[in-house]
Amino acid sequence: MVLDSRSNTTSLKKTPLNALHKEYGARMVEFSGFEMPLQYRNGIIKEHEHTRLAAGLFDVSHMGQGFLTGNDPGVAIEKLVPSDIMGLSSGNVCYTLLLNDDGGIIDDLLVSNLTVSKLGPVIYVVLNAVNAQAKFCYISEKLKNLVEVKPASDRALVALQGPMSEMVISRYFPAASELVFMQAKGMTYQGVEYFVSRSGYTGEDGFEISLPEHCAEHFVRCLVNEPEVELIGLGARDTLRLEAGLCLYGNDIDESTTPIESGLNWTVSKRRRQSRNFPGANLILEQIEEGVAKLRVGLLPQGRVSLRPGSSLFDKGGNNIGVVTSGCYSPTLKQPVAMGYLLKKYSEIGTTIYSEIRGRDLEIEVAKLPFVNTNYYRGK
């Protein structure tokens, strides 16, 4: 995660919660062209631990929200992704990948099949913040005459994550407790329509709530006043997602990586493999059948030093065999963890590899992902 606290924040975009973050003592940094909270007064480790134990509230309004409308937007968007969107029943959510013609990952995104009162049946998408407007333009151009793409720049997005999140959210949306992981529904609070999905990017049970930006500050203040809830910044969001083995676009996946190299094979559904009609299908299906040269893996550095993104990985003979893409100290495991790409022959769990840190060789063990078991709610 690239964060820059030295940027001139006066030129950055701001979310509807910007003033609230500063009121609560946030350390603000540049992220994806936005001024965002890195951490609050308690610090990253305590915020991380609070999310694992109770309920952490994240401002993710910098993400790109939008609606696809038309005769059959689910059929249309399948031209750009490898997942079974046509088979996505109403109220369900799918994590998928926006692919270029070579099978590289333009973005990872959430796609929901929703019914919105003013729009009718729609495909609701959430893109990463980096170049979100350009990506909406890309989708619009690729699906010209098939769908209308409506970026929802007037909506905020917050994520309530942790084992107590259902208890909290049910005080505002009783029907939220009926959702299971990767389900979504339009719900009303104080006469306003919200979109609530049981999803998130921390590995914990939780919810993402899309709401009109003019309601955001009031709603967030209500949530923060709940005894179980604390505001959480980007720093802990990064450590949480890395413990859960989740990719960060721009670090762990980008247009130079395919779903198969990234360990995201499951995003390529069985029906789409048979139809072979998604971008980069020939290469991706060849990789499924014949294997790949490199793979995303978990990494456990031996010692207390964290690996930095971009650090080279070596075998015992000093040969370059890969690169680190994400790394941090794990507050849960009390040790450094990382992810990166390795040549396939070195990717077996338990393999010992090396990196150079401050002029010395650091021993690293290839590890199973996730580092910390996920706690998604899939029903009783």
Image: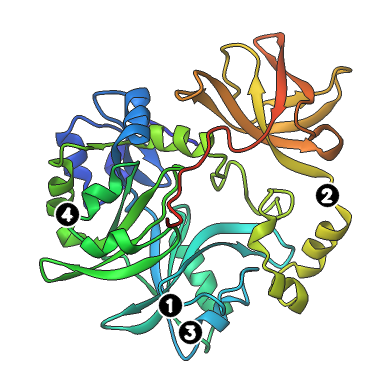
- List x then y, in percent, for residue 299: 66, 28
Front residue of 302/162: it is 162
Task: Give the residue displayed 75% in from the left and 43% down from the top.
Answer: 295
Please name the residue shown 18% across and 49% down the image.
220
Going by the numbered disc 1, the residue's amino acid type is Ser
Looking at the image, residue 9 lies above or below residue 333: below
Q: Nearer the viewer, mark 1 or mark 2?
A: 1
Between marks 3 and 4 in the image, the one whose residue lies nearer the viewer: 4
Q: Which residue is mark 3?
A: 147
Answer with the quarter of the image where residue 320 lies. Answer: top right
Label tally: 4
Label disc, if present, on residue 171 of the rendered structure: 4
In the image, residue 40 lies at what x, y percent?
A: 26, 29
268 sits left or right of 60 in the view: right
- Which residue in the structure is indicated by mark 1? 90
Q: Which residue is mark 2?
A: 292
Cα distance, mark 4 to mark 1?
Answer: 24 Å
Mark 4 is surrounded, within 10 Å at the Cα level, by few (under 14), some (14 to 19) or many (20 or more) other residues, namely: few
Q: Secondary structure at mark 4?
A: loop
User: Which of pointers 3 and 4 lies earlier in the amino acid sequence?
Assistant: 3
